[in-house]
Image: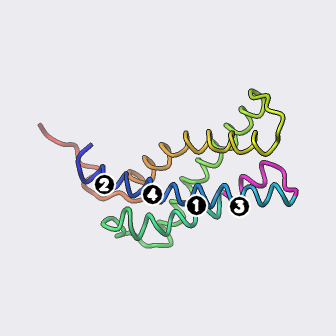
Amino acid sequence: MDNKEAKRFAKFSVVGITNTIIDLALFNVLLWLGFNIYAATSMAFVVAVTNSYFFNRHWTFSDRKSKNATKQYFQFISVAAVGLALNNFIVWLCLHLFHITNPFIKANLIRIAAIGVIVFWNYGASRFLVFKNKEDLEIPVA
């Protein structure tokens, strides 16, 4: 990973940490209000993804925002939808694997595990599908 890519990943990580805080805070509020874990996960995820798109478009990948913003947002949401499906699968799997009695601790540990896996999908898909440049498609010649 070159220095420019490392800086971009660092920015993506800062945005991701912020979104994780937003996601988990809203997730816990929704659980507290009585929403089931899948509804709370989905709603919190959509809010965090929208925040993520804004900051990734204008800061992390600011050198790559040549596309129409509306088209790019829907591409970003499509990538996030795959991430959400993976996220909910991981939540479902962990609910059946971990036997922790406190429901809030269990739910949060599961969400953190899911987020830890999804970050790699989100970065790769954002970098190479949503915020790509035509140079990304060129094959380097040695």
N-term-proximal mark, 2 vs 3 = 2
- Judge whether 9 appears above or below 90 on screen: below
| Element assignment for label 4 | helix
Q: Amino acid at mark 4?
A: Val
Pointer 3 local density, CA inside 10 Å: few below 14, some 14–19, many at least 20? some
Q: Amino acid at mark 1?
A: Val
N-term-proximal mark, 1 vs 2 = 2
Residue 134, given in percent of the width and then of the height, sits at: 28, 57
Viewed as shown, does residue 69 lie left or right of 7? Answer: right
> Which image quarter is the C terminus in?
top left
Towards the viewer: 1 or 29: 29
Residue 34 picture quarter: bottom right
Residue 35 among those drawn in magenta: yes
Provide the residue designation for mark 3: 26
Viewed as shown, does residue 32 lie left or right of 115? Answer: right
Residue 84, given in percent of the width and then of the height, sits at: 64, 49
Towards the viewer: 79 or 61: 61
| Residue 49 disc label | 1
Towards the viewer: 75 or 98: 98
Provide the residue designation for mark 2: 7
Towards the viewer: 118 or 139: 118
Provide the residue designation for mark 4: 14
Residue 120, given in percent of the width and then of the height, sits at: 47, 43
Pointer 2 local density, CA inside 10 Å: few below 14, some 14–19, many at least 20? few
Q: CA distance from mark 4 to mark 3?
A: 18 Å
Q: Which mark lies nearer to you, 1 or 4?
A: 4
Pointer 1 local density, CA inside 10 Å: few below 14, some 14–19, many at least 20? many
